[in-house]
Amino acid sequence: MIQFEGVAKSYTGLISRKRVDALTDFSIEMSRGEVVGIAGPNGAGKSTMISLMMGFLQPNAGRITIDGKPARQWIEGNGVGYLTELVNLPAGWKVPATLQRMAALSGVPSAEIAARSATMLTRLGLDEHAAKSVKQLSKGNLQRVGLGQALVGDFELVVLDEPTHGLDPLWTQRFRDVVTELRRPDRLIIIASHNLDELETLADRVAILDHGRLQRVVTHQTEERSEQLAWRLVLEGSVDVAAVIPGATAVAGREGTWRCVASRRELSQGLGALLAGGAVLVECVPEEGRLESAFRAAVQR
Amino acid sequence: MNRDLSKLRYLRYHALDVAKAPLLIFALVAAGLCVVLWRFSLKENAVVPGPDVFLSMTLAVVLTVACLMASGGVAGNDIARGYYRSWFSKPMAPWWFYFQRWVLGGLAVLCIPAFLGIGLQLAFGKGTGLTSDVFAQTALVYLLVGGTVLLASVFTARDWLITFFLTFLQAQLENVSRVIELPAAAEWMHRVLPPYQMVGVGSPLPEGQKLTHVILYGVAMVVIALVLFEKKPLGSGGRA
């Protein structure tokens, strides 16, 4: 569906003439039916990549196409459910009116605008804020209105830039449910986020950017059983984990708590031996997510 | 979902915005002016101008400001504040969106003489002072002033300020040119800047080459602005 081919974008200071390469030789292909995550540290080029895709910026080199058409041309014909990183909507607009206007712009038929906007208000828990104007909303509620205006058009392409920014834990979880509901074979969902847990949970694959370059694409398919991950184990009583998992170290001051670096296969074999010997497992958790460890490796920090 | 992608689907919201902001203000100001004139006429020995004179005098003062109010800060603000990211992620072309809004602003400006004329008729019952020339001059002023605003709005949210400065500069050049011969650079500027001095309610409607010059200049500004809205990327950075 979307194709970035050798895309580059740089900004040049108006007075200093200093050039900053925001995106360099960036190529990726994204298809319908996928949820693609975009991760990267601050200034990695995530927002520039999205702005280029939306046609709000012109690349210095390369090509961006959607279904074979120039991105801007495709968007003006089809539309995108786009949640901006900073939700900007006119301060004086009432919440329902905002969604109705965005529904009209999205091409929702006139007869359905009111009903669809009302459904979106309820879906995003905004009913109690219906009498408020945009300027009276808290950060989290504004974020939900931003999400509502993106989703009210029911588009094939959904782009969410930092979607859970400002949301409380309850709505962060609810957002994950919303994305799960949004999944469709004919829809591509792109999520740019700093929240690696969120991307690991929601995305089929995650593109990691740093210094304007695509460093790595992590997919469920590329998960390797031999991948070495850090684990924390808690067992009842005094058990010598190091005897079965080489390199395991006891965490000082915490009885029965061990840390080890092992592949899933090595860990499973070690745990099997421990449990067969009568050990009681209390907890076994990765010290960092698979995506988090890939992220660290990709950005080398 | 079956989409309604008609080009005019957002027009009612544009109309609502125009009705709430410039149009309502225009109506209130026109009504206020008519009431002031009516109260003044009740005084003994008051010399009240005829409707046509009052209309010309009033429009000469308020028309440029009204055009700035009707067209100013629309596209420029949307771009500067980042609203455009929400608007134009939807299936809508920027040039068409802003053209509709600009035309509605023009219609609101054309309502000013109508409001004043109706007010005068209600106050004095002696006619409205409205002629086709009044509306034609009003439309030409909007074409030039509103056209300048639209073109400036591609680049800045201070579109109205730039336009105000240009109208002021052109007026000064025109005034000076009537007294002395302008230096070459000033003369060149006088020719190149939009010909605001050629239009205005109260002065004769331009004809022939002058009229063509005014219309072509105005239309060119509008067309260039619309082409730029379509061709020039609206963003200036990842987030901006």
Image (tube, rainbow, N blue to C red):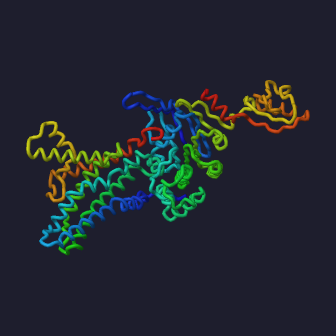
Q: Position of residue A187 (x, y in %)?
A: 59, 48
Q: Give A62 or A258, whichever is nearer the viewer.
A: A258
Quadrant housing residue A196: top right
Quadrant housing residue A224: top right
Query: Can see residue A107?
Result: no
Residue A92 vs A30, above or below: the answer is: below
Q: Give A74 or A79, whichever is nearer the viewer.
A: A79
Q: How many callouts does the rendering have?
A: 0
Horizontal relation, residue B120 to residue A246: left or right: left
Q: Position of residue A85 (x, y in %)?
A: 52, 44
The extreme top residue here reads: A247
Horizontal relation, residue B57 to residue A119: left or right: left
Q: Give A191 or B95, whichever is nearer the viewer.
A: A191
Residue at 56 percent across and 45 percent down: it is A160
The extreme left residue here reads: B180
The extreme front residue here reads: B44
Query: Can see residue B69?
Result: yes
Horizontal relation, residue A237 to residue A300: left or right: right
Indicate the quadrant containing the C terminus of chain B: top left, top right, bottom left or bottom right: top left
Residue B126 vs A214, above or below: the answer is: below
Indicate the quadrant containing the N terminus of chain B: top left, top right, bottom left or bottom right: bottom right
The extreme bottom residue here reads: B125
Residue at 39 percent across and 53 percent down: it is B97
Q: Position of residue B224 (x, y in %)?
A: 31, 45
Residue B227 vs A219, above or below: the answer is: below
Q: Position of residue B18 (x, y in %)?
A: 36, 59
Horizontal relation, residue A30 to residue B147: left or right: right
